Amino acid sequence: GQQVMQIPQYQHVQEGEDFTTYCNSSTTLSNIQWYKQRPGGHPVFLIQLVKSGEVKKQKRLTFQFGEAKKNSSLHITATQTTDVGTYFCAGMLKGGSEKLVFGKGTKLTVNP
Amino acid sequence: DAGVIQSPRHEVTEMGQEVTLRCKPISGHDYLFWYRQTMMRGLELLIYFNNNVPIDDSGMPEDRFSAKMPNASFSTLKIQPSEPRDSAVYFCASSPARSGGRETQYFGPGTRLLVL
């Protein structure tokens, strides 16, 4: 079935270092969404990418959607302790389904 | 808006007991999703509804799980009988109707279920 693979599973960084998480789908996606879940919290929507090759920025966060619409990445520049949490990508299949397939997430810890 | 509301927030029960989880979606949202989150399997979609009608229940693990949405403002996920392997965090999420693209999902705070 449809799978969305996300790496790395864990990432430990020093405050100020950059961080990147990668997402790959076995099939072409209609769009991809990114969510952040703080420890003990629930997933919160960050952004949605729809177009092939799309790049979006939110302050220190940069999101990319691959040309083939099968992969995506989230890059955080100069991490802060407030960036701690698990980042999930979630792909939506082409063809009209509203079903999101979530990656396993990348858990980010930031040492001050 | 109060956001998606789930109850209870925590549930501890014994194996074999019936468990009912409740969800109130954001008013006006047409889609409702039930997810289960565990360390081993991550975030899994169990079932989703559109306008109160179940659309895809392929993620429901087995017949012990059932979900209903009797009206636009209420849904339940029932496990009967419960087993220890059902221990997880269960999230409900809702989404507005499509408007030319796919919509974001708004998650509730989750119900942390422990089956002893």
Image: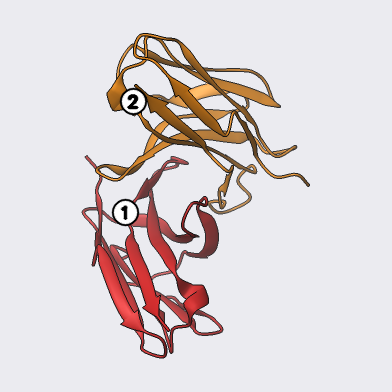
Quarter assignment of residue B71: top right
Give the labeled residue for mark 1: A103
Which chain is represented by orange in the image?
A: B
Give me the residue at 31% from left, 71% from top.
A21
**In the image: residue A106, left or right of residue A100:** left
The amino acid pointed to by label 2 is: Asp
Give the labeled residue for mark 2: B86
Tell me, what hue is chain A? red
Compared with A103, A56 (above or below) is below
Within 10 Å of disc 1 (Cα), the crowding (few <14, some 14-19, many 20+) is: many
Give me the residue at 39% from left, 59% from top.
A88
Compared with B1, B29 (above or below) is above
Residue A44 x, y percent position in the rendering: 54, 56
Residue B20 circle label: none
**In the image: residue A46, left or right of residue B113:** right
Q: CA distance from mark 2 to mark 1?
A: 21 Å
